[in-house]
Structures are given as C-alpha cells and as structure tokens.
Image (spheres, grey):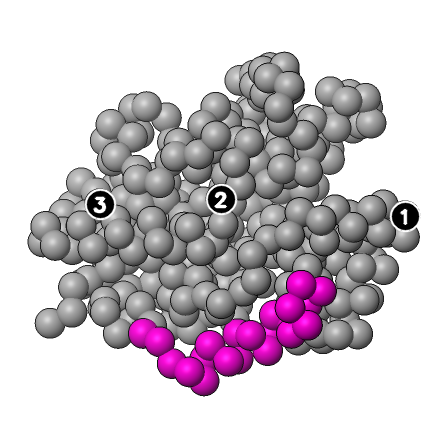
C-alpha cells in the first residue's frame, strides 16, 4: 500500500497551525511547513510563525531554512518537501503538509515544468517597465503572449506576473506551453507515490475571516512587527524587491519605514493586503480537486469547539 500523507490548506488566519498541533497529538505525524514566508530566518512576527511552544508540541520542518536575502523557489520547496516526506514515510509516520502557499502545494502535487533559469537582467527590465507604465501594462503584455497564464494571475501579483513574462522573453515559449509539454511527457504525480488526504480549513462566513485578519495584524503591530522590520532594514543588504520583503505585512511596514506610507495608513493597508492574500488563496482552493472542506462554524453560524474541528479532520483522514 502507498504511504499516507495529509495536506492541510486554507486561507491565512483560518486556524491551520492550531489544527496541525491538535492532529499531532492524535496521529504519528511529522509537520512540514508549506509557507513561502516561514522559510526565512528572523521573520517571525509578520509571518505568524509558530511560537517556540507550538514548535515544541509539533516540530515544523522547512521553517527558518533561508536568510531573507536568499530567494526560495517553488522548485526548491518541492525538492525539500519530497525529501522530508520520504524520511517521514520511511519511518512509518505520516507527513502532514500545512500552510497557505498554494503554488507550493500545486508544485508538490503536479511537479514543475522545466523552466529557464531566472534572469536578473530580464527581471530588472520588466521592473523598470512596470515602474514607468504600471503593472497593468505588464499584465496586458502577458495577456497578449500567454493569455492562459495571464488569466490565472491577478495584476497585483507582481512577482508571478514578472516571472511568467520573464520565461517568455528568456525562452521564446510561454509558461503555459512549457507546462503543457510537461503534462504530455508524463512524470510521476505525487498521488502515484502517496495516498493523500487533502483538507481545507476555513470559516463559512468571509466576514469572520476578515475580523480575524484585522485582529491578527493589530496584534502583530503590538508585538513589535515594526521593530522586526527595522532590524531587517538595518542589515543593509536587503531591499524591497526581494521575495522575503515583498511578503504581506513586511512590504507595508517596509514602505512605512521608507516614508512612502503614512503611519495612519499602515494598519489599514496591512489588513487590506492580507485580505487580498486570503482572496487569492480562496481562488486557488475553489478550483482544487479532491478537497475536503472543514468549516469552523456550523451551518447555523455557531463557532465549533476545537474538539469538534479536530474530530471532523480525523474523520476525513480515517
């Protein structure tokens, strides 16, 4: 029989970490983080990194494995996650992959097409064009050459937008075409190797999630998010275009410290950016196949107790 694996997905602030810890107390699992911000050292508050106590209860792999100056790609994540899963399954345990970076989950499930290596020169040229014309013009350019990818990327998701256009300029082939080639030429899917249970946790009411997001960002500021980003800026080797600094929350505080965002705007902009992230995560999840939805409220709108949420998750896994 294929070894088991569990995917625990969901929008930001939906309760993924709490459920992962609860599951670790009932199943022989190894937690593997699927989060593009948690990989970075020294970025704890703004990434909602599990506390030392939470990590003591359920050690998380793929946390604090990169310096913020070093980008971390989906391909690197896939290689690291597969290695961690193999060790876990080899020990007779169940890898539990938990997080909200949906691109990482997709890469892990389906693999990645053989894309051209990143070109700093092309990326810099695209960034210059965006500064001059706006990212909407870059999105329009991508739509002209690769409408499939353009329709899947929000114009505000500048990192993915830049990479898709970079691939075309570097290779003369579109990213969607390269992915289609990969699909046609085969290659093992993760489901060929593992029996996977996929769970998405979220509130039924989007308003509940919005209130959680607002409360959490307010708490991050109280806990010292501004001071955390100040420490990163003082290093002198980091800049606003790095993936680490472009992470939601960090980007807004960085802009505030640079003087391009007023203090009275910081809280509102941080909350709005986090809501937009949650919206993108929901968009990914709506098109996800073989997904078990675990809502944190009953159909009548009453909040479920932690034990009820755990029981529902265990029922999906059984």
Element type where label 2 sits in the image: loop
Q: Along the line of sight, which residue is nearer the eye, 73 or 168? A: 168
Q: Is residue 185 magenta?
A: yes
The earlier-in-sequence mark between 3 and 1 is 3
Picture coordinates of residue 8, whole percent (x, y):
36, 54
If the image is split into quadrants, where does the C terminus sit?
Answer: bottom left
Which residue is pictured at 43% across the width and 37% down the height?
39
Q: Nearer the viewer, mark 3 or mark 1?
A: 1
Q: Which mark is residue 305?
A: none
Q: Which residues are magenta?
A: 168-188
At label 2, counting other C-alpha atoms closer than 10 Å, the crowd grade (few under 14, some 14-19, many 20 or more) is: some
Q: Which mark is residue 72?
A: 2
Farthest residue toward the bottom?
Answer: 184
The residue that label 1 is drawn on is 132
Q: Is residue 54 magenta?
A: no
Element type where label 3 sits in the image: strand
Picture coordinates of residue 58, whole percent (x, y):
25, 35
Residue 272 position (above or below residue 79): above
Q: Along the line of sight, which residue is nearer the eye, 20 or 147? A: 147
Q: Along the line of sight, which residue is nearer the eye, 200 or 299? A: 200
The reply to whether dot 2 and dot 1 touch (C-beta < 8 Å) is: no
The earlier-in-sequence mark between 2 and 1 is 2
The earlier-in-sequence mark between 3 and 2 is 3
Picture coordinates of residue 162, whole percent (x, y):
70, 55
The residue that label 3 is drawn on is 30
């Amino acid at each position: 029989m294929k070894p088991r694996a569990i995917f625990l997905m969901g929008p930001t602030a939906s309760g993924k970490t709490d459920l992962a810890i609860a599951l670790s107390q009932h199943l022989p699992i190894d937690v593997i983080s699927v989060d593009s911000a948690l990989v970075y050292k020294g970025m704890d508050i703004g990434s909602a990194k599990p506390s030392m106590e939470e990590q003591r209860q359920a050690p998380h792999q793929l946390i604090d494995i990169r310096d913020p100056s070093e980008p971390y790609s989906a391909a690197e994540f896939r290689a690291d996650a597969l290695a961690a899963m193999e060790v876990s399954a080899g020990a007779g345990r169940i890898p539990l992959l938990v997080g909200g970076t949906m691109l990482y989950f997709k890469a892990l499930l389906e693999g990645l097409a053989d894309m051209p290596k990143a070109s700093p020169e092309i990326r810099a040229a695209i960034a210059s064009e965006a500064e001059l014309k706006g990212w909407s013009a870059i999105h329009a350019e991508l739509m002209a050459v690769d409408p499939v990818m353009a329709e899947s990327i929000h114009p505000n998701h500048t990192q993915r937008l830049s990479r898709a256009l970079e691939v075309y300029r570097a290779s003369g082939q579109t990213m969607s075409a390269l992915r289609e080639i990969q699909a046609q030429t085969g290659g093992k899917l993760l489901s060929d190797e593992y029996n996977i249970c996929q769970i998405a946790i979220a509130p039924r009411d989007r308003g509940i999630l919005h209130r959680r997001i607002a409360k959490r960002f307010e708490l991050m500021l109280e806990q010292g998010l501004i001071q955390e980003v100040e420490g990163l800026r003082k290093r002198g080797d980091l800049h606003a275009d790095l993936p680490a600094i472009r992470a939601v929350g960090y980007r807004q505080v960085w802009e505030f410290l640079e003087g391009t965002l007023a203090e009275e705007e910081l809280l509102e902009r941080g909350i709005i950016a986090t809501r937009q992230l949650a919206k993108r995560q929901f968009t990914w999840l709506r098109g996800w196949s073989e997904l078990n939805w675990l809502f944190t409220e009953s159909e009548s709108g009453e909040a479920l107790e932690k034990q009820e949420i755990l029981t529902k998750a265990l029922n999906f896994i059984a």
